[in-house]
Image (cartoon, rainbow, N blue to C red):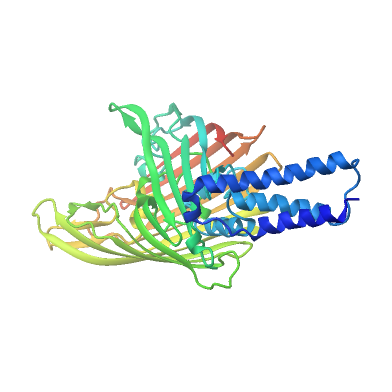
Amino acid sequence: MRPKWRQHLWAWLVAIALSAPAPSLAQYSDQKSQEERIQELEAQVADLHAKQDKAEPKASPAPGEEKDQEAADKAVTAARGMNQEERDQWHDGLAAAQPANYNAAWQIGTPKKDVVDKGWWGLKDTPSEFRMSGWVQFALFHDFQGNAFDEDEAFSSAVVIVPTLKRPSTGVDVRSSRIFLEYRHLFDWEQKRKNFPGVAHMLFEMDLGGTVFGDGYGPRVRQFFIQIGHLTFGQADTTLSNGGTWPAYFDRAAPGAYPEVRRPVLRYAAALSKRQKKHQHVLTTGIELPRTEFTNAESAFNAPDMLVRYDYNPKWGNLMAAVIVRYFVAESTLTEARATKWVAGGTLSGWALIPTKREDRLKWNFLIGPGVSGLMFDTATAGGLDGTYVDATNTLLTTNAWGIWAGWERPWADKWNSLFMLSYVDVLNVDGQAPETYSGSVTATVTLDYQPVDHLFLAVEYFYGRRVNFDAQFGQDHRLNLVFRYMINR
């Protein structure tokens, strides 16, 4: 049993440590005094332990002594940076607005785990963290018709040759390898806010989809953006996309692989109620620079798209609704005459945990309207689908389409996972379209992956794609993938 005066001394030291305010950005400028205070506190605690061990034999701690030790440890931790409450606020805020493509990529093989907090390295004596993550992927593919594989992107039914051309081909793909570099920092000036904490989050994403000297594989920037609290700016996945609904298959992580869904964005996201837990209701507004494509015309003015999005995040999943408004200015490639038009489109999407033993996931995404035809999975690769310029009447006929995909992900065991996905796209208006123009497509995907050890995934994937033109002619393709993927810093 320790003498009373030693217990009082211990309590006094702990009280001094706990009374110190949480460090602010101003305090970090005086790094020398901060380090001295920490070292002094640690020296006092170590000296007290040495005296106690020398004065009396080791014995079971008296009631309350373990709590004192825990409090002292917390005091030292708090002096070095964020306390636990601040860190919890930080992580909740990041979870509410993580990059869509990033979330989809990390869902593979981990349907029960939240990856927001994995792999971060703290920067000493600052409320900052850094992470490098991603994967190295090697895939051997075989196309039975050899016409649905684009050297730049993933399997897409929209580029199947019509009619079917039986030209089998086999190849190797390494371009799906991915690197994420992230940095995040907590600002004191938002500590008292209960909505979104003051967090700066930077993400840089790169793959090997670029080229070097014309034909060699090279790095390509996919996303590079910064989030500060509510605000996001940079190149990121379009606000219209819901990354949580993207199928977690291995073929270029499509449809997130399509470059059309990554655009310069400026958006603002905020929780609708300060009392809500885990940001259950989130409203997002933003503007984005599109990649507009017309048939028989060029875009004369690349007006920003305007978007509004609502997310509902219950415990069992996510529901999202969004609307996009676009303004087209098309200039004829023949007469240089111009035509303008306002269009709009929308999407309903979500995912839900199915109450089974393994917690299966059901995913869906529905898009409709002339404003979304260039952002719809298969149609994003078809080209020229925003509209067709009619020179005879100097008018712009915008493409009206709708599409849906649905997926079912199931973890069969601790190391086995499967995915089944089916998608359908239909272009509604036929006015001004050539007979050989893309009219719709169907895609089916089956994936089985196995995780023999941590970080390593082996997968088999089968794709079926069917394209239909306006003249009712069609083409189809089958593809088989054998995939090796090694996750980095997972």
Q: Is residue 471 left or right of residue 331?
A: right
Q: Is residue 88 visible?
A: yes
Q: Nearer the viewer, residue 330 or 32?
A: 32
Q: Quadrant of the C terminus?
A: top right
Q: Position of residue 465 (x, y in %)?
A: 45, 43
The residue located at (19%, 64%) in the rendering is 340
View extreme (front): residue: 5
Residue in the image at 57% along x and 45% along y:
35
- Could you say where residue 122 lies in the image, as x and y percent from the top left? 56, 44
Q: Where is residue 31? Give x, y as percent.
A: 51, 46
> Farthest left residue?
335
- Residue situated in front as seen by the camera: 89 or 414: 89
Against 382, is 146 above or below? Answer: above
Q: Quadrant of residue 484?
A: top right
Residue at image position (75%, 42%) is: 47
Q: Position of residue 124 (x, y in %)?
A: 55, 43
Q: Is residue 358 visible?
A: no
Residue sitting nearer the eye, 421 or 454: 454
How many discs appear? 0
Q: 158 left or right of 197?
A: left
Q: In front: 404, or 164?
A: 404
For the point 64% across and 36% down, which residue is it?
450
- Classify residue 103 as left or right of residue 472: right
